[in-house]
Image: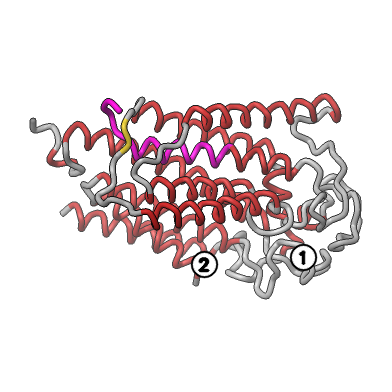
Amino acid sequence: MKKFLSIVFVLILGGLIINHLASNNLIPRFGDVVLTDRVSDAYIDRDVNGGDEDVAFGESEDLESGAANTVTAIVADYRSFDTLGEVTVLFVSSLGVALLLGQSKRRIGLEFKPNFMLKIGSRALFAIILMTGVYVILHGHLTPGGGFPGGVMIASSMLLLYLADDEFRAKMRGFKVLESMMGLLYIALGLIALFISGVFLENFMDNGTLGTLFSAGMIPLVYSIIGLKVGSEISSVIDHFLSEEGAS
Amino acid sequence: MIQIAGILLMMLGLYGILTNRNIIKIIVSLNILEIGLNIFIISIGFVRAGEAPLFSSEAKSNALVFVDPLPQALVLTAIVIGVGTTALGLAFAKQIYAKYQTFELDEMGEE
């Protein structure tokens, strides 16, 4: 009976949404969006605060936001305060996991005895995954990626070590210090911008040429902070899930 | 078409949340709902024959047609928050399992 009611409810709700989408003029049909009607056009043209410059890859200098990746320009520059809140959400959730699972002493063992080759091979792969994460973080303003995916890559390299070695245990104290330091640094960066330019988290550094590695002012800095913070947070979540209570 | 697929995934996830009595399955349903929502939000910004919102040596100037970058930035936020809620939900599930030795909601509270 409950299943039948759920099916009816879900079908009616889905039908209403699809019907509403089909008859609503405000939401254009799939693929027929005209971007010049939307706010996002200003983000691509980099003229949110006025001005009408052409944006050209490798040539334009000192644009409003110097990141070649427009999504990064939105996330880490135009809406940086929003990202500060997002980082806080992740911090609160990792804090909640730490509070719920408590001070677990012993890590959960593996069901097999890892041999020598597995241990050494996973160490080699660990370095490659870690460097990929760092690359993705540092090139967040040029290519797809950035602080959040890069941070998760760093955490996944830690997960590999946890899964391949039953004696491995990361030093969680270091991760906690790193995480708090990065959170403080992000806010400190915002306050420095407040003193220099009068707006919290405004990009106060030189924007450089669009498309070069040393460009986009504050964005690589912000994304390195976010990457390290997300990496240490997810690593500590992994450690909490892979350990249980009891004496070591 | 993609929009309808996104809505279908959302409805599938909602159905799973309504009918399942297993904590892990509820969390998985929540994730399916979230993926459907993300696909739907991204599909709102799609422009046919548009470039990815990224200046590169292939797409050099802002005179080209780009896909809407704003929904993508919002979905990035949504994905991160989804990771947070999933981690917290799984931590609750682990605590519940440590107390009751089961993930089934119906079998709890009998000891």
- Stretch of the chain drawn in magenta: A229-248
Residue that mark 1 sits on: B56
Name the residue located 77 percent from the left edge and 41 percent from the top edge. A218
Q: Is residue A239 magenta?
A: yes
Q: Is residue B71 visible?
A: no
Point out the frontmost of discs 2 and 1.
Answer: 1
Q: Is residue B39 visible?
A: yes
Residue that mark 2 sits on: A22
Judged left or right of residue A203, residue A119 is left
Q: Is residue B60 above or below residue A182?
A: below
In the rendered image, residue A58, in percent from the top left (x then y), is placed at 86, 61
The residue lying toward the viewer, choosing from A221 and B43, is A221
Q: Are marks 2 and 1 on the same chain?
A: no
Residue furthest out toward the bottom: B49
Chain bearing tag 1 is: B
In the rendered image, residue A158, in percent from the top left (x then y), is placed at 47, 45
Name the residue located 64 percent from the left edge and 70 percent from the top edge. A32
In the rendered image, residue A170, in percent from the top left (x then y), is placed at 45, 36
* Distance of label 2 from label 1 (alpha carbons): 36 Å
Name the residue located 32 percent from the left edge and 36 percent from the top edge. A107
Which quadrant of the figure has residue A248? top left
Q: Amino acid type of disc 1?
A: Ser
Q: Is residue A181 magenta?
A: no
In the rendered image, residue A62, in percent from the top left (x then y), is placed at 90, 49
